[in-house]
RNA sequence: GCCCAGGUAGUAUAGUCCGGUCUAGUAUAUGCGGCUGUCGCCCGCAGGACCCGGGUCCGAAUCCCGGCCUGGGCGCCA
């Protein structure tokens, strides 16, 4: 097929911006054919762009021959440009349609698409991910990512306002940041290297100069996880703050979450309606529950967790979904990472916390150890060799301030904000144990 | 790594328990034809599928074994 070139055409507006008030105006629309309804003497083309759809109406006997023949050649997903006149009408739900004066066919598409883009026959997530580029052309599938965009923008705005500096730390590292074997090895000019699992050590070091920092970026975990809330590559929103403790950053966190929910509720009403989901703005402060209290609540339900053990997911589920957002504090020291500060009054407990939403761990954080000797001791208790952390440990010789921080799993937060039950739905191109493409 | 469940047209499903008019049904999508106000348009026609290999049996989508692939739960964690 002979394709048209864009030439000097410039979009005058998105489809969604056209209202009956634009009656009689000439518009240039760029987008895609979503649907064609041909009734014989009249043909309706639904043109879609990022912001929505609009009907192009073609009364076959009243349009120029060129427009008629172009419109006959159209198929679903063809990329098109339409120049035409807005007409107010009571024949469409939106109250407007566009009568075309000129149509350009900018690209074509397969006759049989791998997905039903009208959503009449929804495909499974596996099939959708295999054709992700097309899948995202459906409004309800793109909606989650528009919400994610606004959520992240809100988080950034809030942190900037609180004086945080956005930083970038390495993704390629020489040794494990938190120990364990859950790293992806990479070859680095003949040396063995790894993909970073977290910016933890770097952001801590930065508190002694930049004081309040945050980073948004992908991190990598080579865990053989197989759940609806794990990815091998996920986006982390990390902060670290000098001269702060766990309670300080918990207060910051609950404000960030509240502000994000408020922003999403205000700016994404269309997307939330598309997803048929409601975001509620949580009240502050969030409930704080200690590890011991969680254990005793579970005991009342007949679930006995020996003290010191981590709380298994089924137990969290048993606690009920009416809990919403809540903090769990005062974890056993040995259950948390080596850099989490033990309580000075009761060293078997630590100043680490998790922010839960129902049974999902959304955020984890805490006061960090600022004392080098204690940090080395904790490393050894965790079976880590302090020698492999020498570049990190040396920072503690130069005036490491007391500090605290946390990390939000962006995709998990997006699940909470969109009601999606599978994390792969809120990752554009998810990576998990079995999926490496597209 | 452990434990379940499942693989049927482009997509989504029925059928599998208890083998036989299953020549594998339906919806949607696709192609062709018809229709001047549709908006999940409508009507007609057409093509299109039992994951792979082996076994049992007169006969296998259905039962058995092996393989491959996928989903869910656990653990781990964001």
Image (spheres, rainbow, N blue to C red):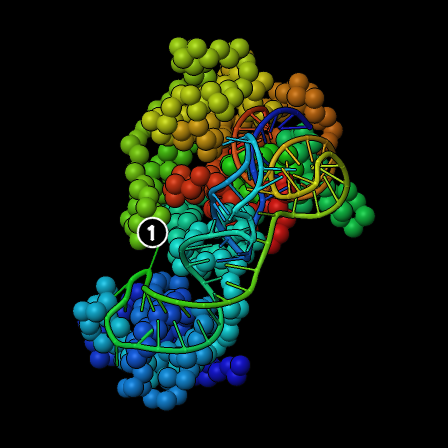
Question: Where does residue A116 sit, x and y in percent of width and height?
Answer: 45, 58
* Kind of element beneath mark 1: helix
Q: What chain does mark 1 sit on? A: A
Question: Where does residue A352 sit, x and y in percent of width and height?
Answer: 50, 24
Question: Where does residue A389 sit, x and y in percent of width and height?
Answer: 69, 32
Q: Around disc 1, counting alpha carbons within 10 Å, would you say few (fewer than 14), some (14 to 19), or many (20 or more)?
A: some
Instruction: Inspect this view and state whether residue A296 appears.
Output: no
Q: Residue at x 53, y 68 (%)?
A: A110
Among the 4 quarters of the image, the one containing residue A289 = top left
- Quadrant location of the C terminus of chain A in the rendered image: bottom right
Apparent side of residue A60 relative to residue B78 in the rendered image (left or right): left
**Total numbered labels placed on residues in the image:** 1
Along the viewing direction, whichever of A243 and B9 lies nearer the viewer? B9
Is residue A246 depicted above or below A239 in this figure? Answer: above
Along the viewing direction, whichever of A42 and A151 lies nearer the viewer? A42
Query: Please, which residue is most extreme toward the right here?
Result: A190
The residue to which callout 1 is attached is: A274
Q: Residue at x 37, y 84 (%)?
A: A68
Is residue A72 depicted above or below A364 in this figure? Answer: below
Is residue A6 depicted above or below A371 in this figure? Answer: below
Is residue B9 depicted above or below A222 in this figure? Answer: below
Q: Residue at x 76, y 47 (%)?
A: A187
């Amino acid at each position: 097929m002979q394709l048209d070139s864009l030439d000097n055409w410039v979009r005058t507006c998105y489809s969604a911006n056209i209202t009956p008030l634009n009656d009689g105006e000439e518009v240039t629309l760029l987008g895609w054919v979503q649907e064609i309804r041909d009734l014989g003497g009249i043909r309706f083309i639904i043109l879609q762009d990022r912001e929505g759809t609009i009907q192009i109406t073609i009364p076959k006997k009243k349009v120029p021959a060129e427009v008629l023949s172009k419109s006959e050649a159209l198929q679903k997903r063809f990329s098109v440009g339409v120049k035409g006149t807005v007409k107010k009408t009571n024949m469409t739900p939106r109250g407007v349609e566009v009568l075309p004066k000129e149509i350009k066919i900018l690209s074509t598409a397969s006759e049989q698409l791998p997905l039903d883009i009208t959503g009449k026959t929804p495909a499974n997530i596996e099939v959708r991910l295999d054709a992700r580029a097309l899948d995202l052309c459906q409004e309800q599938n793109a909606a989650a990512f528009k919400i994610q965009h606004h959520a992240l923008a809100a988080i950034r705005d809030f942190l900037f306002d609180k004086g945080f500096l956005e930083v970038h730390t390495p993704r390629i590292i020489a040794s494990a940041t938190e120990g364990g074997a859950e790293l992806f090895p990479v070859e680095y000019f003949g040396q063995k290297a790894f993909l970073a699992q977290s910016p933890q050590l770097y952001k801590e070091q930065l508190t002694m100069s930049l004081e309040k920092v945050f980073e948004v970026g992908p991190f990598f975990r080579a865990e053989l996880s197989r759940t609806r809330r794990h990815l091998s590559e996920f986006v982390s929103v990390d902060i670290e703050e000098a001269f702060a403790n766990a309670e300080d950053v918990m207060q910051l966190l609950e404000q960030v979450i509240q502000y994000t929910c408020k922003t999403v509720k205000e700016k994404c009403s269309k997307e939330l309606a598309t997803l048929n989901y409601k975001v509620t703005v949580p009240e502050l402060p969030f409930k704080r529950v200690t590890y011991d209290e969680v254990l005793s609540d579970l005991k009342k339900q007949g679930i006995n967790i020996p003290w010191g053990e981590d709380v298994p997911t089924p137990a969290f589920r048993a606690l009920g979904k009416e809990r919403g957002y809540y903090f769990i504090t005062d974890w056993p020291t040995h259950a948390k990472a080596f850099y989490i500060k033990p309580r000075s009054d009761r060293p078997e407990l630590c100043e680490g916390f998790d922010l839960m939403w129902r049974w999902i761990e959304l955020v984890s954080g805490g006061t960090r150890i600022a004392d080098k000797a204690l940090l080395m001791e904790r490393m050894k208790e965790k079976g880590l060799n302090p020698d492999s952390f020498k570049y990190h440990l040396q920072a503690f010789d130069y005036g490491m301030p007391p500090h605290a921080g946390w990390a939000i799993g962006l995709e998990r937060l997006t699940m909470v904000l969109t009601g999606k039950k599978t994390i792969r739905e809120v990752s554009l191109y998810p990576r998990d144990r079995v999926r490496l493409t597209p």
